[in-house]
Amino acid sequence: MVDLIQLLEYTDLQGPDALNMIWRIYDDAFEEMAHERLDGCMSQWEEASRRSGQPMQDWCIYIRKIRLEVQSQDPESKISDKSLASKMLRGSGLSRSARAQVLFNCGGIYDSDRMETVLKVSHGSIQSSERRHGQVLAHKHSQNRHHSCVRDRVLSYERRLSKSPKR
């Protein structure tokens, strides 16, 4: 990455717009093409589903954000409110019966505001339930901390053994 600006002369960096020039160089090198951005956000929309352990509120915000990205990349594509509500429910990670209950609580209407409200009220603490039932894998950081604690205890035990008088 530094190689891109190593070609600049010292005098180039002294100008008042040196920072803008550096940003332009990096933008040209790393910016995605329009079709790549569209493909990326369309893939996100198609593959979107709530991750195990993700709060329902975060899921609803995430799916709305993806919808906005799709529509900003392709203004001609219109994801209706009904489609958004359907995607919100289908991707929520709930069982079929729980999804049916949510739809019933929405009055049988696919409305994204209603859907979001019902999902957050009826399944607002789903992430806690999933953790309790072992449906969420422990974070790598906590696993590493556990392994280091075990390693420290083993090393401490070995040190005590080596210091104790031998019989």
Image (tube, rainbow, N blue to C red):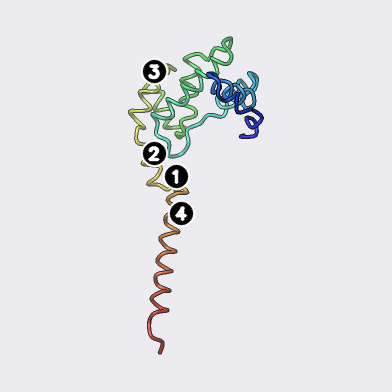
State the residue in front, 83 or 51.
51
Horizontal side of 4 relative to 111 (left or right) equals right
Can you say which quadrant of the picture contains the C terminus? Answer: bottom left
Q: Mark 4 against mark 3, which lies toward the viewer?
A: 4
- Say which amino acid is labelled 1: Val
Marks 4 and 2, how far apart at CA: 22 Å
Query: Which of disc 3 and disc 1 is earlier in sequence?
Result: 3
Query: Which of disc 3 and disc 4 is earlier in sequence?
Result: 3
Q: Kindly identify which residue carries mark 3.
A: 113
Horizontal side of 89 relative to 31 (left or right) equals left
- Say which amino acid is labelled 4: Asn
**The residue positioned farthest toward the bottom in the image shown:** 167
The tag on residue 136 is 1
Label 4 neighbourhood size at 10 Å, few (<14), some (14-19), many (20+)? few
Q: Is residue 2 above or below residue 154?
A: above
Element under disc 3? helix
Query: Which of disc 4 and disc 1 is earlier in sequence?
Result: 1
Element under disc 1? loop
Marks 1 and 2, how far apart at CA: 8 Å
Q: Kindly identify which residue carries mark 2.
A: 127
